[in-house]
Amino acid sequence: MGTNEKKSVRRRAARIVGTASAVAGMARNPDVRRAVLAAPFERLTGRDGHGGEPDVAPGAVTIPAPVGIDDFGRRSTATASSPTSADLLGEALADFDRAPEWFTLHSAWRGDPPGRLAEGDAFAQQLLLMDIPAEVRWTVVSAGATGLVLRGTGPMGIVLGLWATVVADGAGSLVRVDVGADGPPLRGPVGTTVMRSIDAALRVSVDRIAAMDAGASARPQWTVRDEPVVHTATGRVLDPRTPVVVGVGQVVQREPDAAADPVALAARALRAAAADSGVGDDLLRAADAVYAIPSASWTYRDQAALVAEAVGASPSERVQSTPYGGDGSQLLVNEAAAAVASGRSSIVLVAGAEAGSTLAALQKDGRSPAWPVQEDGAAPDRVVGVDRVANHEVETAVGLGAPVFMYALIESAVRRRRGHDVPTHRRAVAELWSRMSAIAARNPYAWSPTEVGADELATATPANRAISEPYNKLLCANLQVDLASGLVVTSVAAAQAAGVPQDRWVFVLAGASAHDEWFVSERADLSRSPAIRAAGRAVLDHAGLTIDQVAHVDLYSCFPSAVQIAADALDLPLDDPDRPLSVTGGLTFAGGPGNAYGSHAIATMVPILRADPTSTGLSTSLGWYATKHAVGLYSATPPQVAYAHLRPTVDRPPARRALRTYEGDVVVEAVTVPYDRSGRPEAAVLSTLTPDGDRVLVRTDDAAIVALALAVDGDPIGRTVRLAAGAATLVRRKVAALPDPPRAPVRVERDGAVAIVTLDRPEVRNAIDVRAATALEQAIDDAEADDGVRVIVLTGAGGTFCAGMDLKAAARGEIPVTERRGPLGLTGRPPLKPLVVAVEGSALAGGCELALAADLVVAADDAVFGVPEVRRGLLAAAGGVMRLRDRLPRNIAMELTLTGDPMPSQRLADLGLVNRVVPAGGALAAALELAHRISANAPLSVSVGKQMVDAAPAWHPDEAFERQSVMASPVILSDDAREGVLAFAEGRDPVWTGR
């Protein structure tokens, strides 16, 4: 290609990129997104981008279309009634500094805000069009008591008009807002999608105008510029969307106060955070998102809404974490930082609070608190995190339904891993917790700021009664507290615009979230957390650091076993005096405010990092029984790479089966003894392993077994017990090795951006039982969550693909249907990412149904497919019959369904079901080649393309093109689209971001 040709290509690329930037709509604003999704195809009924009459507002008054709107090829309008008089509302609109209060397209000012508008004024404003900033230069045509008229020009020849009109309607007023748009980029299907977004934005805008107070604006009008920010201390030039924590606040209320519900305490903490930023309450009023950590002491339907109201914020998005889980605090900060980094938010408030101490005091007096109760329909915009039943039925059956008992059981497994006998470990745990108390004694926000010695902690007394062996009360989280925390997370551009001094900035370098095998009773090793290890490595690798370069640490510390497990996973020593494992003192002494402890850890970490600006801090949060985890990495020094919320694939060992009944000899793996309030042992709870590696939980009040669990005659771990007729008997004192878990029924490997999932039960031709279905579901979930995985390949071990449901297991009542993905762990909800199956041998019954759930099929030339369920009085109801009819001609689907006869791969390739037929033994290699070709393409294009292929057959011809435009627009206007065009023009490979 010659020089002139290259220049021409580059010019065309620049035009395409500019067009994409200019014609986008308002996807960043959550209010707008909800409005778009509420009625995505309303323009098909007449509003096709060429105008239409607005809904008639209540009352007799109407506002005609404004003069000049017909000059534009694309038009949008919305109306609303307001209790504010027309004169006052018109005056408020003319003060265009208040535009960010109501004009949802506003992103930032270019230069100074325009102030009160006057005819002939000119100013520049940055609008958000489909998540892409576009500069518009406005000229004021008129402004006064009846509203305003603006004309503007944007990039690539776009012209715009904005009308806001107000007329009297009784004691109030009627408001109408119109936008006209035209120009080459808007004269096509993309323009239709853009105008749909503007429709949604105007509906939100006009409602905000109607709700405006005619007085002075309460919302600060800072000029947030979408321009690089210079970090003074390092000289680094930062992306304006780089997330920082700019303010932290904590509240400790040691005297009960019936007037202070958790929301009131959270608002106090946020005001303290705003003061800590150096800006004050204006920072809270400017927030565009509020994230709430749900209170356990008082339940709210939309806690974020009440917190926002209490601090004077008018957020576009309200978010909360799941109702139960201490991972929620760090998880919300991870999500807040992601929202800032994406440009979806500029200022996010994160708050949590508990008033458990006050609630207990009121209940002791026989009173109930008069705290807020919201209407039934109240709900946040979004809930983040994993919300599942915490316990397997075998766990609750033996009394392990509360954290104190479960963590006490886990503690004995940790003791075994650490090689301690009972007295040594009891001392080690007491010393660990004594060091925690010493940290709390220096923490002004600790609930119990008193240092407690190891001897006192290890000794059961009336004030420190035994709860569950080996835990006394002062080794457990203290949930009966009145504590609150508030964090303010902003972009560096917003921080600079608000005037937050840079020495208050602490950067969120990276965040990660993951979960372990969900039920404790199914974990391979009770003493380890592969999920914490994966999340910790993910954030450290992202930041280019090792754990030795992390100077400050806070590990979630509800119970000693949780700290020891996390320290092991992160390769942290337990007793390093220069790097203690908490900055607060932990949940016993600093306090355990329900789900919100992690936010106190962050609030305590931030001042430490400000004082030590070149250092790095790491904080962990966890939920339930070391089940779900979130990790954050922080520093006052800017990051080397852009922030990311990572969801790494967890390298889980094989899960154990949790057996409901078992008779025979078992090896004791872990023990605890719960105590009643008088200090008497109630029973012994044993976790035992069968010779096959399955787990059996036992609860017994047999005196000999209780004495065994209490180590009256030596360490109980490794002893052999016989289970028979509902009783447990010690049969062998010699310590035995713990049996390994059964082989994993599903293996997962990574090959670049491809996850290879292998069904690994060749002894039964990879038939699916409950355990295999659960493992398959988990493998698919992990691959879906991991942004590094772009394609999934499913295959089978031992020269065959899958024989379907394990009929012998089904005969025992073990039906392989999982909680989230349904039959066989996949077919009810196939992955959103592309799924390629590699079939060797046979894909029969459920195996054929798995193949039919895939997007692409590669098969060996001797492979066969079939649904022989009719021969067993069954039916291929895991999606088989349904998908056969969808993918094959009717008569072929009938033949397969009614005869049960298999069909060879080549025949199915001829009919279009199989994509590639390869020599036997080559299916996986061919599938991987196909998968890598897919993974090399733009992720968003692949994702939307897959959705469109699946959705298009159901579209009516009259709306098909419109629906296609709606789906395609985010791709056409994406960062990756611009990157692809520029990479082509510059003769290089594209670098995809998935945005």
Image (cartoon, grey):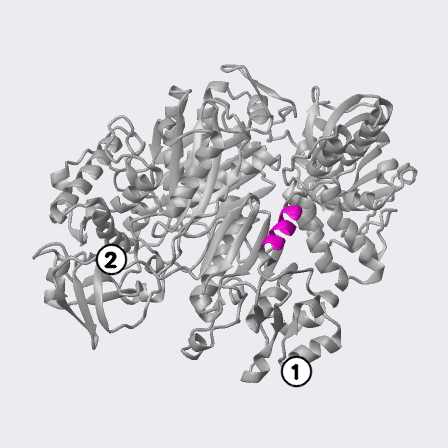
Query: Does the magenta run of residues contain 272?
Result: no
Tell me which residue sits at (66%, 82%) in the image: 898
Query: Does the magenta run of residues contain 928?
Result: yes
The picture places residue 393, in percent across and down from the top left corner, at 35, 66
Quarter holding the C terminus is top right
Is there a contact, CB below 8 Å, between mark 1 and mark 2? Answer: no
Find the magenta span and give its range. 925-934
Which amino acid type corresponds to the residue marked 2 in the rendered image? Leu
Element carrying mark 1: helix
Element carrying mark 2: loop
Does any portion of residue 88 appear in the rendered image?
no
Q: Position of 435 compared to 401: left or right?
A: left
Residues 616 and 841: in front is: 841
Residue at the spot of label 1: 898
Mark 2 crowd level (few <14, some 14–19, many ≥20, 10 Å Cα)? some
Q: Position of 110 compared to 517: left or right?
A: right
The picture places residue 444, in percent across and down from the top left corner, at 30, 29
Q: Which mark is residue 738?
A: 2
Residues 866 and 11: in front is: 866
Task: Give the prevailing secondary structure in the magenta stretch.
Answer: helix
